[in-house]
Amino acid sequence: MNKTAKGRFITVEGGEGAGKSSNLAFIQSLIETAGKQVLFTREPGGTPLGEAIRELLLGHKHTGMADDTELLLMFAARAEHLQQKILPALERGIWVLCDRFTDASFAYQGAGRGLSLEKIAKLQQFVQGNLRPDLTLLFDVPVDTGLQRAGKRSEPDRFESENRDFFEKVRAGYLQIATQEPDRVQVIDASPALEIVQDQIKTVVQHYLESQGE
Ligand code: Z5A
């Protein structure tokens, strides 16, 4: 829980092709309609250094990157992102909407790559202290649906080139986090048509806004 900051920290997560990108502007507009200033950002990335790290992580130049290197680069980008962008915004009362955050490290590097969850939790504490998202929307679709949707896009990046088994583990990892933290992590069934997905998003976001007295 983000107790030190004045703004709220909202993250959006999901497996391959789940439909995060298709709904981020909609989520932002719901929060702005409640009169909040929103900073939209993403991980890995969000700062010039973070975006440079993103290129290293997603591009195909370092295909054989060690799993530990991948994890550390995610957290290096995150440290920069927090210090330069997220924390200053929250301190100013701005609501931060972030496309992926540390749940993705637990799901992709932990569940997907098989790295120790304890090791990731230590990095989380080192880089973030006690800062955690206030609300996380987890877009969930069966892996085959997600891959079919994502397959219609352009050339796959280094993560999108992983196999089906990897994405099954990532999905299970995300759902495990949702089971462990049901208040913070709200699962959106991203399988149906966009309007039905957006009805669910509206319910979750408006309920959260009301719970904050907004
Ligand atoms: N990563 C990591 O490993 N560890 C970390 O700590 C962090 C990240 C922070 C970059 O993420 C990669 O970084 C990511 C995990 C890793 N790798 N993967 N995979 P990203 O978020 O930038 O990239 P992405 O996962 O590929 O997300 P995306 O590009 O934003 O796609 P999406 O959100 O999954 O889906 P979309 O683009 O909104 O939709 C895909 C297609 O489906 C598109 O044609 C839509 O029109 C269609 N769509 C969407 N919704 C629907 C519905 N409801 N019905 C039918 N069709 C739909």
Image: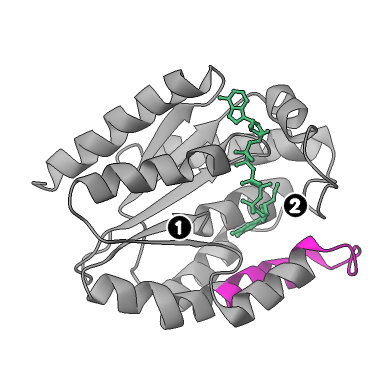
Asked which colour scheme the image uses, the reply is one colour
Relative placement, left or right, of 172 versus 196 is right
Rendered residue at 64%/73% (across/down):
51
Give coordinates of residue 71: x percent, y percent.
68, 67
Q: Assess whether residue 70 is covered by the magenta stretch.
A: yes
Between circles 2 and 1, the one closer to the viewer is 1
Q: At 21% across and 65% down in the image, what residue appears?
A: 3
**Callout 2: CB less than 8 Å from ligand 1:** no
Q: Quadrant of residue 40?
A: bottom left
Determine the image quadrant of residue 89.
Answer: bottom left
Is 155 drawn above or below residue 119 in the view shown?
above
Q: Residue under circle 2?
A: 113
Horizontal and vertical percent for residue 9? 33, 59
Say few, some or many: other residues with alpha carbon within 10 Å of mark 1 (under 14 / 14 to 19 / 20 or more).
Answer: many
Proximity of marks 2 and 1: CB atoms separated by less than 8 Å: no
- The residue at the point 89 percent across, 62 percent down is 60
**Could you tell which of marks 2 and 1 lies nearer the N-terminus?**
1
Residue 6 counted in the magenta span:
no
Q: Which residues are magenta?
A: 58-77
124 on left or right of 144: left
Residue 72 in view in this figure: no
Q: Main secondary structure of the magenta part?
A: helix
Amino acid carrying mark 2 in the image: Arg
Residue at 38 percent across and 42 percent down: it is 27
Kindly report the distance in space between the C-alpha atoms of the residues bearing marks 2 and 1: 23 Å
The numbered mark at residue 98 is 1
Front in this rendered view, residue 152 or 65? 152
Q: Quadrant of the N terminus?
A: bottom left
Q: Is mark 1 within 8 Å of ligand 1?
A: no
Q: Give ligand 1's quarter of the image.
A: top right
SS for dot 1: strand
